[in-house]
Amino acid sequence: MLNIDGDRAAANVAGAIQSDKILFITNVDGLLMNDKLVEKLTNAEAKEIRPKVGFGMEKKILAATEALDMGVKEALIGNGQRENPVSSAISHTKCTVITK
C-alpha cells in the first residue's frame, strides 16, 4: 500500500512554482481551537500551535507552514462543504489564513 500525503505534495508544488496562495480543503471551516475558528495565524504561530491540534489538521498546518517556508505568500484552510468553497476561502470568509 502506498500512502501519499496530498497536502504536502501540493505544498511542494505551490512552493516550486512560487504560488501566491495555497488552499487546503477539509470538512470543517479551518483550524478550530476550543471549538472556535482560528481565523488568522502567522507562520511562526502555526508552527507553535501544530503539536496541539489533531492529526488530520496537524498535517494541513505542517503543509501550510512548509509552503510558506518555500515562498508561498498565503495558506488557506477552508471547508469544502461550504457553498463556493474556493471563493469563500480566497475572500477569507470562514477559514483559517496563515501568512508569513
Image (cartoon, rainbow, N blue to C red):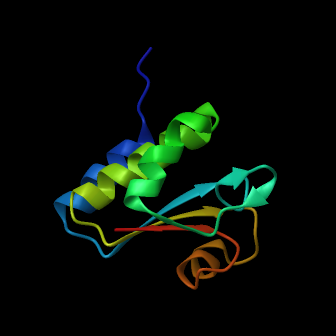
- 10 or 70: nearer the viewer: 70
- Vertical comparison of 40 with 31: above or below: below
Residue at 40 percent of width and 47 percent of height: 63
- 3 or 96: nearer the viewer: 96
Question: Would residue 93 appear left or right of 7 to someone viewing this image?
Answer: right
- Vertical comparison of 24 with 21: above or below: above
Can you give x and y, in whole percent of width and height, for residue 22 in the image? 41, 65
Q: Quadrant of the N terminus?
A: top left
Q: Quadrant of the C terminus?
A: bottom left
Tell how many labels.
0
Can you give x and y, in whole percent of width and height, for residue 17 in the image? 19, 66
Can you give x and y, in whole percent of width and height, for residue 23 in the image? 48, 64
- Vertical comparison of 10 with 52: above or below: below
Residue at 46 percent of width and 56 percent of height: 45
Can you give x and y, in whole percent of width and height, for residue 79 in the image? 68, 62
Q: Which quarter of the picture shows residue 67?
A: bottom left
Q: In the current view of this chain or complex, which residue is farthest to the right?
A: 35
Q: In the current view of this chain or complex, which residue is farthest to the bottom?
A: 91
- 19 or 96: nearer the viewer: 96
Question: Would residue 6 appear left or right of 81 to someone viewing this image?
Answer: left
Residue at 53 percent of width and 80 percent of height: 90
